[in-house]
Amino acid sequence: MPKLLRNILYGFLAWFIPFASSFLFYTKEGKLTIDAFLFKSIMIVVGTISAAFLLISYFKKIESGFFREGILVGAVWFALNILLDVLILIPMSGMTFPDYFMRIGLGYLAMPAMSMAVGTALANKK
């Protein structure tokens, strides 16, 4: 699979896994079944763990330019997650974009931080 396609696919999975798992905490009517702060914490943990596993899998096939690749992966995943939220999550939730960005979107900056950390660690190991 071409590197760019794998990057986009893994970025989609980094968005989809927490999104799909969030449905476990809502009723059919759209009401949250647990405390909102607990829900947010669970989503952060699910997103972080899934992104970490996806980053490990992605970088297994990278042989050089690790830091550059970390920047690229982080930028693509960040942009893709924001785009998917704008297209799907914001309309579902009824939030305004500024409200969404303060509550959720800003947290996606963890993706470039994690991917650049992985890239740096691999570059320093070689």
Image (spheres, helix red, strand yellow):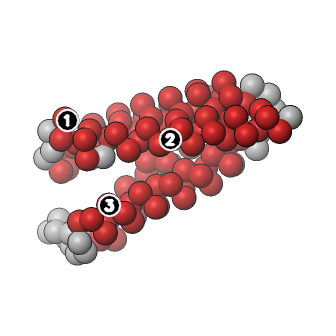
Identify the disc placed on residue 57: none
Q: Which amino acid is tagged 2?
A: Met
Residue at the disc numbered 1: 97
- Figure quadrant of the N terminus: top right
Element carrying mark 2: helix
Q: Which amino acid is tagged 1?
A: Phe
**Which mark is in front, 3 or 1?**
3
Say few, some or many: other residues with alpha carbon within 10 Å of mark 3 (under 14 / 14 to 19 / 20 or more). Answer: some
Residue 120: tell me if it is visible. Answer: yes
Element carrying mark 3: helix
Residue at the disc numbered 3: 40
State the image quarter where residue 26 is shown: bottom left
User: For the residues marked 3 and 1, what is the alpha-carbon distance in whole angstroms?
Assistant: 18 Å
Residue 97 in the image, given as x and y percentages of width and height: 19, 35
Q: Which amino acid is tagged 3?
A: Lys
- Which of the marked residues, 2 or 3, is nearer the chain's N terminus? 3
- Asked if residue 58 is positioned above or below residue 80 in the image, the reply reads below
Q: Is residue 120 left or right of residue 100?
A: right
CB atoms at circles 1 and 2 under 8 Å apart?
A: no
Residue 30 in the image, given as x and y percentages of width and height: 17, 65
- Which of the marked residues, 3 or 1, is nearer the chain's N terminus? 3
The residue located at (23%, 66%) in the rendering is: 36
Q: Is residue 65 left or right of residue 114?
A: right
Residue at the disc numbered 2: 111
The residue located at (54%, 56%) in the rendering is: 50
- Figure quadrant of the C terminus: top right
User: For the residues marked 1 and 2, what is the alpha-carbon distance in whole angstroms?
Assistant: 20 Å
Residue 84: tell me if it is visible. Answer: no
